[in-house]
Image: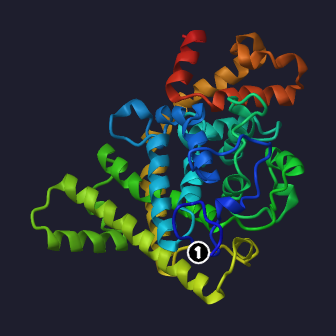
Amino acid sequence: MKNNDDNRYLSSFACYSSESRGRMYTDEPLILGRSEFQRDRDRIIHSEAFRRLKDKTQVFVYHDGDHYRTRLTHTLEVSQIARSIAKALKINEDLAETIALAHDLGHPPLGHRGEDVLKKLMIKCGGFNHNEQSIRVVTLLEKKYPYFNGLNLTFETLEGLIKHNGPFLDKREIPYTIDEINKIFPLDLNTYPSLEGQVANISDDIAYLTHDFDDGLREGLFTINDLRKIKIIDEILHKLKKEFVNIKIDILIHQFIRHLISYFINDVVSNSLIVINVNNFENVNQIRCFENKIIKLSPTAHSNMEEIRNFLFQNMYNNDILINKLQNNCLMIEKLFFLFHKDTNLLPEQWKNLKGRLSETKQSRVITDYIAGMTDGYLKREYQKYFD
């Protein structure tokens, strides 16, 4: 049995906080019986970037209604799914939860439309990607400690965030921020992340591809009957209506989403355990060096998820009314970007003191860091301060 300060039984191939590869900077000793990954989790929850997620768009502009998901509620849903999967696989729940809680810290205001605008504005200055921006937040932009910038998270947490979509097999595809971190804190970019990192990644897909049905139905973009075109949902709805006669529509919606989440969680656990048991992994490094990712859905469930994804893109994410509303709001990002470029004295004090030492490219990055950190509400207030 390994030395285990994670307060639960873990499989030999899990990440043990007592065996962490450490942090970029020397840190204070742990107190109160916490593990290294619990410390990471707490630092993320207490960060300003995490608090700002409450007013950032998930799909619908957050002030459109009280019950639409924000980037924060989505993040919490991802973390709970990650913990459920991690517990079933007997891997480190704290680490899986921590990675899930941090995975969207770099998302700009106005969701993916806001990201598209910043990507276009930064095309000649290194681009913009919310995954890379999350790394910038936790390693550079959060300023709470006297001896280092960022949150000084463990290797294992950073690995889960950086390898969100798998290893970087082509060095030319390594984002600038990650490449700079790798020079001083080697991240093994050519290997897969731990199982905990892989769990956080698939939990993100499960969360948004199930819960977004709730918001889409609430907005009237489609009906329950429209969803019967999707085979797995039709099966669940048929089963629920057979079990609960005259079930109310709002309860039916909650129950079918609940059953859909359970379906994907059970499938990913069962399918992943097959790979784990066949290969008899002994430690986390064997996980990292495996030829493929291990945490994944069965072919049937993967096909069902892709059918759901296609339906949501066609009927929700690419809805003309929704896109136009977000696109009009996104003009605020573009106009503020050019305004701050024209006069950096308009930036807040903690940002404008950097302007004298920066090239145009780095100045653009500073402005982008500032805008990306804005909530939807703050973006609107800043815009109204300078424009009619």
Quarter residue 365 falls in: top right
Q: Quadrant of residue 285?
A: bottom right
- Residue 343 visible, this orientation: no
From the viewer's perspective, tell me whether residue 244 is left or right of residue 167. Answer: left
Give me the residue at 84% from left, 63% from top: 170
The image shows residue 221, relative to residue 168, as above or below, that is: above
Nearest the viewer among 42 and 188 is: 42
Residue 65 location (% of width, % of height): 34, 34
Q: Residues within 10 Å of mark 1 (few under 14, many from 20)?
A: some
Query: Label 1 amino acid?
Result: Ser
Q: Residue at x 43, y 50 (%)?
A: 316
Q: Is residue 176 visible?
A: yes
Residue 83 vs residue 318, the one in the foreground: 83
Q: Residue at x 42, y 54 (%)?
A: 315
Find disc 1 in the rendering and name its residue.
11
Report x, y in % for residue 352.
76, 16
Q: Residue furthest left?
A: 246
> Percent from the top left, x then y, of residue 213?
37, 54
Dot 1: element:
loop
Residue in the foreground of this view, choosing between 327 and 40: 40
Instruction: Decide which of 236, 334 is in the foreground and name it.
Output: 236
The residue lying at 70 percent from left, 44 percent from top is 29
- Residue 193 location in percent, x, y? 69, 64
